[in-house]
Image (spheres, rainbow, N blue to C red):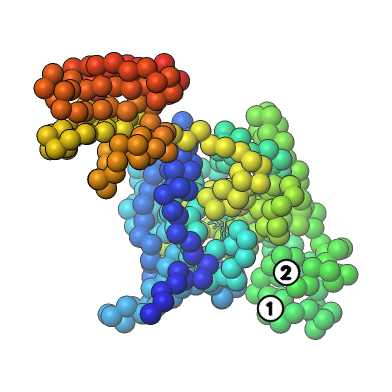
């Protein structure tokens, strides 16, 4: 039997995982600075939550969910995104009653969508997302966008393009919706079956259709920006003003609609230009979802957030040849020579580790020369050599592998010695 990894998934092998850890650490650290706190929700939820939360006219709900029945006959779904789960938890845990408002949360974890796998589009992918619930101050829209931009900037990405739009409040959306229906209805038979179904249910999504993107009616379709009422217009202007105040460049694109149903007012995406990135250019997407908490059974509560995938981020870093400052080497390699020294090695290595140095040793009965090679390969700064003589003297011979210099150090001081000399190596 030949087992293969499921389509659209990947193993993150030890050579790659330090990058993931570095990026995740960056996300934790940035969220700490912005004062967002981590939430961890289950990887599966009741199927209904996503049908309601994400919206049943979306591609995600119609085509992409991993839905299964458990042994108790319940319909469950692997989460395709994090917002619905976060909002479910917000409602269930009555976070609207918490003293500190808005409630500012973030998550990092795997999401699952049955998509056609291609570069940057996986069936299991990891999202880093934030959700701020309880405030409809346009300043928090700007804060959420700034956090996403800072994340990429601090990792060294260039060529980012922030695209913002307003989808308006309920009143503006209704006016726009009617205009869209009037615009597309007479020729709807020329559109794909998905769009035909969307016309009455959710005509906004027609603008997002890939199959019909070249239809002449797309070009002069009614723009939401012409249908914003005064309140929505002022809201959008305020968000833009805050972004400008923060020196965050952006462009307004009235065709940005996003693929999920819950958005209103602010919607945004962060794209990347650049060759070699294939068809996928959106790194991050988010927006405001003022009706969602209510939809999931909570009190009327405004919310805004974004999500981005670490897979696409890593691709972007790779295409720009950005090396992350990853520390993956060992401080020292312990080499025991002779029976007696070998017997003492495990205890001594263990003590070194307890004293805080990163040290490895041989378990393959390698010859001395091969052990020095291993030390080199692992990037060790020092070899710690223990032979019969050293054992009798209660010392180890520490060899600086870059200069070849060596000296004897008392065993109980060896870890401390390595730690204090690490600095000279620029670690
Ligand atoms: P989304 O646009 O569906 O929004 O996904 C956000 C980001 O997740 C995308 O921009 C992309 O980086 C990444 N992504 C999505 N699908 C895949 C995939 N198949 N493979 C790799 N990466 C993928 C949401 O998920 C919303 N929950 C965002 C949000 C949070 N809005 C408000 N709060």
| Nearest to N terminus: mark 2 or mark 1 | 1
Camera-nearest residue between 160 and 94? 160
Tag count = 2
Place of residue 294 in the rendered image (x, y in percent of width and height, measured from the top left): 47, 59
In what quadrant of the picture does the N terminus appear?
bottom left
- Residue nearest the observer in this picture, 49 or 60: 60
Measured along the vertical axis of the image, is residue 314 above or below residue 249?
below
Image region (quadrant) for ligand 1 = bottom right
Label 1 Cα neighbours within 10 Å, binned few <14 / some 14-19 / many ≥20: some
**Residue 6 in sight in this render:** yes
Disc 2 marks which residue? 209
Tags 2 and 1 touching, CB below 8 Å: yes
Q: Locate residue 394, reporting x and y percent.
A: 13, 20
Judge from the rendering whether residue 64 lies leftward or rightward of residue 86; answer left or right.
Answer: right
Residue under the image location 38 percent in, 62 percent down: 43
Q: Secondary structure at mark 1?
A: helix
Q: In the image, is residue 75 above or below residue 396?
A: below
For the point 21% across and 28% down, which residue is it? 386
- Whether residue 147 is visible: no
Image coordinates for residue 202, horizontal then vertical, percent: 66, 70
Q: What's the CA distance linking mark 2 and mark 1?
A: 8 Å
Q: Which residue is denoted by mark 1 in the rendering?
A: 194
In the image, residue 90 lies at what x, y percent? 39, 53
């Amino acid at each position: 039997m030949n087992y293969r990894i499921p389509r659209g998934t990947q193993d993150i092998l030890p050579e790659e995982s330090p990058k993931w850890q570095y990026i995740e650490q960056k996300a934790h650290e940035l969220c700490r600075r912005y004062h967002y706190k981590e939430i961890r929700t289950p990887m599966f939820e009741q199927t209904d939550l996503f049908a309601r939360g994400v919206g049943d006219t979306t591609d995600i709900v119609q085509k992409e969910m991993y839905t299964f029945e458990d042994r108790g006959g319940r319909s469950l779904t692997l989460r395709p995104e994090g917002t619905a789960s976060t909002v479910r938890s917000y409602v269930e845990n009555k976070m609207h009653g918490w003293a500190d408002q808005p409630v500012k949360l973030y998550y990092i974890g795997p999401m699952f969508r049955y998509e056609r796998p291609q570069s940057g589009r996986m069936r299991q992918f990891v999202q880093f997302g934030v959700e701020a619930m309880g405030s409809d101050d346009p300043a928090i829209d700007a804060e959420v966008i700034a956090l996403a931009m800072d994340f990429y900037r601090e990792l060294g990405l260039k060529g980012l393009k922030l695209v913002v739009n307003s989808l308006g409040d309920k009143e503006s959306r209704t006016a726009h919706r009617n205009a869209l229906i009037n615009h597309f209805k007479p020729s709807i038979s020329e559109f794909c079956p998905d769009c035909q179904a969307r016309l009455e249910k959710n005509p906004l999504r027609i603008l997002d259709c890939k199959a019909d993107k070249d239809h002449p009616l797309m070009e002069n379709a009614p723009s939401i920006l012409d249908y914003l009422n005064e309140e929505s217009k002022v809201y959008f202007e305020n968000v833009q003003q805050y972004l400008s105040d923060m020196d965050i460049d952006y462009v307004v694109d009235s065709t940005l609609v996003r693929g999920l149903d819950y958005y209103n007012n602010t919607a945004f995406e962060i794209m990347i230009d650049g060759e070699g990135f294939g068809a996928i250019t959106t790194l991050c997407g988010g927006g405001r979802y003022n009706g969602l908490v209510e939809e999931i059974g909570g009190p009327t509560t405004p919310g805004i957030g974004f999500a981005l995938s670490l897979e696409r981020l890593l691709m972007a870093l790779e295409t720009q040849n950005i090396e992350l400052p990853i520390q993956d080497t060992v401080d020292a390699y312990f080499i025991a020579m002779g029976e007696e020294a070998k017997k003492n090695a495990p205890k001594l290595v263990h003590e070194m580790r307890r004293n805080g140095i990163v040290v490895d040793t041989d378990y393959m009965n390698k010859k001395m020369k091969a052990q020095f090679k291993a030390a080199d390969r692992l990037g060790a700064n020092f070899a710690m050599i223990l032979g019969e003589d050293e054992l009798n003297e209660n010392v180890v011979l520490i060899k600086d592998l870059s200069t070849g210099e060596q000296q004897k150090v008392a065993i109980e001081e060896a870890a401390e010695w390595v730690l204090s000399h690490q600095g000279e190596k620029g670690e």
